[in-house]
Image (cartoon, rainbow, N blue to C red):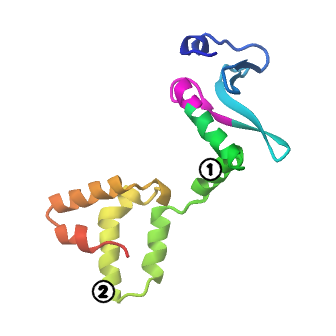
Amino acid sequence: MLTDTKLRNLKPTGKLYKVADRDGLYVAVTPSGTISFRYNYALNGRQETITFGRYGPGGITLAEARERLAEAKKMIAAGKSPAREKAREKARVRDAETFGAWAEKWLRSYPMADSTRDMRRSVYERDLKARFGNLKLTEITHEDLRALTDAIVERGAPATARDEKIR
């Protein structure tokens, strides 16, 4: 079974090698020294591998890898491929529209009076574009929106914070 000490002491060799943990989880150590958590499984007669993430600074811990393994095993039991679901999620995030692109499309095509459109474009340009314009829609959380509306209220424009919700 792996420990953090054992993981820190793994050194690269001339080729990729694997070190087993438990429950099928293992780490793969590349020739460059990258250590990544992986799991091999069979689903519908096909052998598949899912990589949970890298170990080390900026990566995931051994405990997190074990949690992700438990989630993957639940998916497999339900007949879903964790590797394919991970790839689909990455594609959704990659292909997701940015807030700025969505807002521009909405401002162009949503039926409203020209004066309303001008006012809403002004609010977008002043309050939303710099903060959210380049973010994917999936990246914006309700905490982000709450912080923005609180800042708008604090600057003395509570009507903008309340009334200019994009419907």
Numbered range of the magenta stretch: 51-66
Would you name the residue on which mark 2 appears?
115
Would you name the residue on which mark 1 appears?
90
Residue at the spot x=32%, y=72% of the render?
165
Compared to residue 28, the image places residue 155 above or below, namely: below
**Disc on res. 13:** none
In the picture as drawn, the residue positioned furthest to the front comes out as: 77
- Please tell me whether residue 62 belongs to the stretch shown in magenta: yes
Instruction: Specify whether residue 136 is in view.
Output: no
Which type of secondary structure does the marked residue at label 1 adopt?
Answer: helix
Rendering coords of residue 13 (x, y %): 75, 13
Nearer to us in this view, 89 or 69: 69
Compared to residue 97, the image places residue 83 above or below, namely: above
Labels 2 and 1 touching (C-beta < 8 A):
no
Residue at the spot x=67%, y=12% of the render?
11
Instruction: Report the amino acid beneath label 2.
Output: Ser
- Please tell me whether residue 33 belongs to the stretch shown in magenta: no
Which part of the image, by quadrant, shows the C terminus? Answer: bottom left
Q: Looking at the image, is mark 2 or mark 1 earlier in the sequence?
A: 1
Nearer to us in this view, 127 or 85: 85
- Is residue 139 rendered to the left or right of residue 73? left
